[in-house]
């Protein structure tokens, strides 16, 4: 078992780290950073910087214009990108586009890839994933899916409502999950300017890191050609798992970078700030928080690397990605919370980046399934005999 990084991984890590420090962090206080995320103009500027650096959309296949990174390589690059709140936007690795790119590489037809995927990989467009619905529709429980799709000749007619749709405002296209007449689910691709789609409003949310914010959508007799079905009819829930297992893990990767930034900021402050005759970091209460931060960061990173390695071995990792998502979201949140505490008054002002990280990070324990749902799922699998030790026995868990 070798945890050392290869020369190529060290080169990738250093390249992303330097790019974030030199090109991205200086733009964090740009006036084009809005309550609903970086503006489209700021996003495009960041994308062009990453393109020039040879770092744009590194997770996409080389055939589509990416770098074709493995999951372990993504863990390294995404953590470094996450060190800035704008880093994932610059590299085109933010949700929902990152997960949509992965899903479409696996499921989309060649015609769909050329029409929708390639411009997305190249950073020319954005997308959204329309799954979550207002009550009583689908949320953490996808079986409550209420948006419907009915076949009408060569088209499907979609009716329903969605909300918390990240990146909806300004997105070029959507992947829409809808329920069929037999109760199954299907994914559809649709341009956002097609008649029958309405962006009702953009929601005001705690986080501000996603371009386009979180939108409320209404579908009123939206007609989607049958050729725009993503994958096969009736396999929407299966495809959702194809998307979610890696997407949960990439959230962990990106926010690990932000948690590390918060810790580094707190550590620097604790080394300089004087209180009661000595530097802050020499006080036991503060030093314990710094030590706890280091332990949480290391634990999160090991969970990410292990699960990424399993994905690279071809395992589906639904169990492992759920486990990592809970561990990382809670550990990384603790790091940020402690870091704010160490900075005291400065930790709650925008004199530092910490308040933005704090606000963005709190949502991580909810996005892609709240901790409670993942714990429930993990517990059920453990009771059913599908323990978390299958990989150590050489078992390819399905």
Image: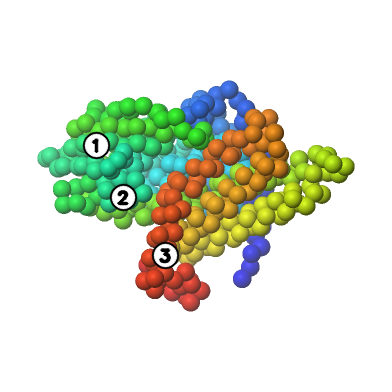
Q: Report x, y in % for residue 144.
A: 27, 48
Identity of the residue drawn at 36% across and 27% down: 201
Instruction: Tell me the CA gap for discs 1 and 2.
Output: 15 Å
Q: Is residue 207 shown to the viewer in this render?
A: yes
Identity of the residue drawn at 43% across and 54% down: 372
The quadrant where residue 386 appears? bottom left
Pointer 2 or 3: first along the chain? 2
Q: Which residue is mark 2?
A: 142
Residue toward you, 297 or 355: 355
Q: Secondary structure at mark 1?
A: strand
Residue toward you, 117 or 184: 184
Locate the C terminus by quadrant.
bottom left
Among all residues in the image, which is located at the extreme right? 277
Residue toward you, 123 or 212: 212
Q: How many marks?
A: 3
Mark 1 Cα shell of 10 Å, populated few (<14), some (14-19), many (≥20):
many
Mark 2 Cα shell of 10 Å, populated few (<14), some (14-19), many (≥20):
some
Residues at discs 1 and 2 in contact (Cβ within 8 Å): no
Locate the N terminus by quadrant.
bottom right
Identity of the residue drawn at 26% across and 46% down: 145
Instruction: Tell me the CA gap for discs 2 and 3.
Output: 19 Å
Q: Which residue is mark 1?
A: 160
């Amino acid at each position: 078992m070798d945890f050392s990084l290869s020369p190529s991984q060290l080169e990738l890590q250093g390249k992303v780290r330097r790019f974030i420090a030199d090109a991205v962090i200086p733009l964090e206080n740009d006036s084009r950073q809005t309550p609903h995320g970086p503006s489209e103009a700021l996003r495009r500027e960041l994308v062009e910087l990453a393109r020039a650096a040879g770092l744009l959309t590194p997770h996409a296949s080389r055939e589509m214009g990416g770098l074709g990174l493995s999951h372990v390589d993504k863990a390294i690059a995404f953590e470094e990108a996450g060190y800035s709140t704008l880093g994932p936007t610059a590299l085109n690795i933010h949700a929902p586009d990152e997960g949509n790119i992965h899903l479409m590489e696996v499921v989309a037809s060649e015609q769909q890839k050329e029409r929708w995927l390639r411009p997305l990989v190249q950073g020319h467009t954005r997308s959204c994933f329309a799954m979550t619905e207002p009550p009583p529709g689908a949320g953490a429980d996808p079986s409550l899916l209420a948006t419907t799709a009915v076949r009408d000749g060569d088209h499907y007619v979609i009716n329903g409502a969605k909300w918390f749709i990240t990146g909806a405002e300004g997105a070029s296209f959507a992947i829409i999950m809808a329920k069929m007449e037999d109760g199954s689910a299907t994914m559809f691709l649709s341009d956002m300017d097609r008649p029958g789609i309405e962006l009702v409003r953009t929601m005001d949310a705690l986080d501000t890191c996603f371009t386009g914010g979180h939108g409320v959508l209404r579908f009123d007799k939206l007609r989607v050609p049958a050729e725009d079905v993503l994958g096969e009819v009736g396999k929407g829930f299966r495809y959702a798992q194809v998307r979610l297992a890696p997407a949960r893990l990439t959230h962990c990767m990106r926010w690990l970078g932000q948690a590390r930034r918060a810790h580094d900021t707190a550590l620097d402050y604790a080394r300089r700030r004087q209180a009661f005759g000595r530097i802050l970091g020499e006080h036991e209460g503060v030093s314990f928080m710094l030590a706890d931060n280091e332990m949480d960061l290391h634990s999160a990173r090991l969970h990410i690397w292990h699960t990424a390695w399993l994905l690279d071995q071809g395992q589906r990792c639904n169990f492992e990605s759920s486990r990592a998502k809970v561990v990382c979201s809670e550990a990384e949140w603790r790091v940020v919370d402690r870091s704010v505490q160490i900075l005291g008054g400065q930790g709650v002002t925008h004199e530092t980046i910490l308040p933005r990280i704090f606000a963005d990070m709190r949502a991580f324990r909810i996005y892609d399934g709240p901790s409670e749902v993942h714990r429930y799922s993990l517990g059920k699998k453990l009771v059913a005999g599908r323990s978390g030790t299958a990989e150590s026995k050489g078992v390819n868990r399905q």
